[in-house]
Image (spheres, rainbow, N blue to C red):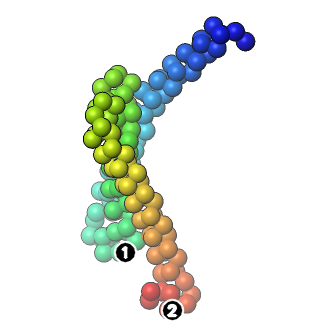
Amino acid sequence: MSFASDAALIATYRNALLQCNRYLAMFVVFFGVVGHAANISVLAQKDFRSNSCGWLFLVSSFAYLIGICSALISRFLSTWALDLTETNSFFCKFRGFLVFSSLTCAYWLTVMATIDRWLSSSRDANYRRF
């Protein structure tokens, strides 16, 4: 392969990545926000809030919503050179902290809800009380 064909291949890959970041991120943000907003509206009802598992899933949906919005909106804006995280060090660090802490919190809340459901459906009464 020659250098010119390598450069053309790299340019093609970069263009494909730019288009994926531009259009796929919009798709994921839209359906992520709509889906988690629906989860929040259902799980915020009084019957579900009184349940410990419902409460964990409600807080998890909030955390996922924060993670999706903070991660993908800046990636979407970077395709038009409007991303402040590329030029401002504080915003870059804050975005990284917000994305990773909210998604980690959401994952652990889902794990705790799974453990809660497992314990509450156990045959052993000691586990159900726990």
> Closer to the camera, 89 or 16?
89
Quarter of the view holding residue 101: bottom left
Quarter of the view holding residue 50: bottom left
Q: CA distance from mark 2 to mark 1?
A: 18 Å
Answer yes or no: is residue 96 visible: yes
- Residue that lies at the very extreme toward the front in this rendered image: 89
Which residue is under mark 1?
52
Q: Specify whether 90 is left or right of 29.
A: left
Of the residues shown, which amino acid type is indicated by label 1? Ser
Q: Secondary structure at mark 1?
A: helix
Q: Specify whether 46 is left or right of 21.
A: left
Figure check: 66 above or below 81: below
Q: Residue at x 51, y 92 (%)?
A: 125
x then y, percent, for residue 72: 39, 38
Q: Residue at x 70, y 9 (%)?
A: 2
Q: Specify whether 121 is left or right of 65.
A: right
x then y, percent, for residue 28: 43, 38
Q: Secondary structure at mark 2?
A: helix
Which residue is under mark 2?
125
Quarter of the view holding residue 1: top right
Of the residues shown, which amino acid type is indicated by label 2? Ala
- Residue that lies at the very extreme toward the bottom in this rendered image: 125
Q: Are marks 2 and 1 in contact (CB under 8 Å)?
A: no
Q: Residue at x 30, y 26 (%)?
A: 82
